[in-house]
Image: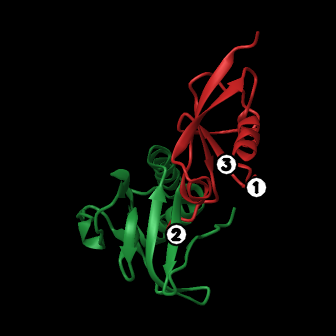
Chain colours: A red, B green
Amino acid sequence: MENTLQIQVIYFAKLRDLIGLDGEIFSMEEGNNPSDVLASIKKKHNIDIGTKFKIAVNDEFSQWNIKLNNGDKLVFIPPVTGG
Amino acid sequence: MKEFKITSNLINSQIIGKSSSIGARSVFEGTVRDINGGHDVIKLEYECYKSLAIKEGNKILDEASEKFGLIDAFCIHRVGTLEIGETAVIVVATSGHRDEAFKGCRYIIDEVKCRVPIWKKEHYQDGETEWLKGAG
């Protein structure tokens, strides 16, 4: 049986307003990546939030296809608008 | 001195100390304007992913210092609710001569606007609000 990964997802800005949560935990399968988590978010909340995000894993910019580890903190970063 | 800061307190360019050993000091101050895309804006809300914002902001200051030989590189960005006319961001770049100071200051604000995870929500006169879309 495959191990389950507990992934902490944090939402900011427009994404947080759309989903209505500051964050939540997703149970994922070993070998899953941020794209798989995004698919789970869309399925669970039944909303189309697009794919126009950068990825941060454990407070570092990362990639869509990186293999996640148990306990990782994952953030989908909408296009930034500071300044 | 190199420092990138996020604050929820009021900021203005007087908070930046002056050094007597430099020849040029370029300061950029970004403020909240009252109109955007034809909408009357009454206030702004800035939100930030702080731990990553500080890392990325400091990386930008390192790059600017390296590229333009800056003596000081400083940036402070405000978060929370800002009223019209208040300062949202200040950048300071110092060097021996003006050319490097201007270029370094410009590099820092341009990179901050497209790389640092900070988001802006506008509140309009008609009661509507909108997270700005950004360049992607």
| Left or right position of B120 against B96 | right
Q: Position of residue B57 (x, y in %)?
A: 48, 52
Packing grade of label 2 (10 A; few <14, some 14-19, many >=20) is many
- At numbered mark 3, what does the secondary structure look like: helix, strand or loop? strand
Quadrant hosting residue A7: top right
Mark 2 or 1, which is nearer the eye?
1
Q: Is residue B123 above or below residue B18?
A: below
Q: Quadrant of the C terminus of chain B?
A: bottom right
Task: Residue under label 1, please give it.
Answer: A48
Quadrant hosting residue B129: bottom right
Residue type for callout 2: Lys
Disc nearer the start of the sequence (1/3): 1
Nearer to us in this view, B53 or B22? B53
Task: Residue under label 3, please give it.
Answer: A54
Task: Residue under label 2, please give it.
Answer: B121
Q: Position of residue B46 (x, y in %)?
A: 45, 64
Q: Position of residue B36 (x, y in %)?
A: 56, 84
Q: Are marks 1 and 3 on the same chain?
A: yes
| Left or right position of A19 against B103 | right
| Left or right position of B36 against B33 | right
Disc tally is: 3
Residue type for callout 3: Lys
Cα–Cα span, label 1 and label 3: 16 Å
Q: Is residue B64 above or below residue B41?
A: above
Q: Is residue B34 above or below residue B45?
A: below
Mark 1 or 3, which is nearer the eye?
1
Tell me which residue sits at (76%, 43%) in the image. Answer: A43
Cα–Cα span, label 3 and label 2: 19 Å
Tell me which residue sits at (53%, 51%) in the image. Answer: B63
Q: Are marks 3 and 2 in contact (CB under 8 Å)?
A: no
Q: Are marks 1 and 3 in contact (CB under 8 Å)?
A: no
Chain of residue at mark 3: A
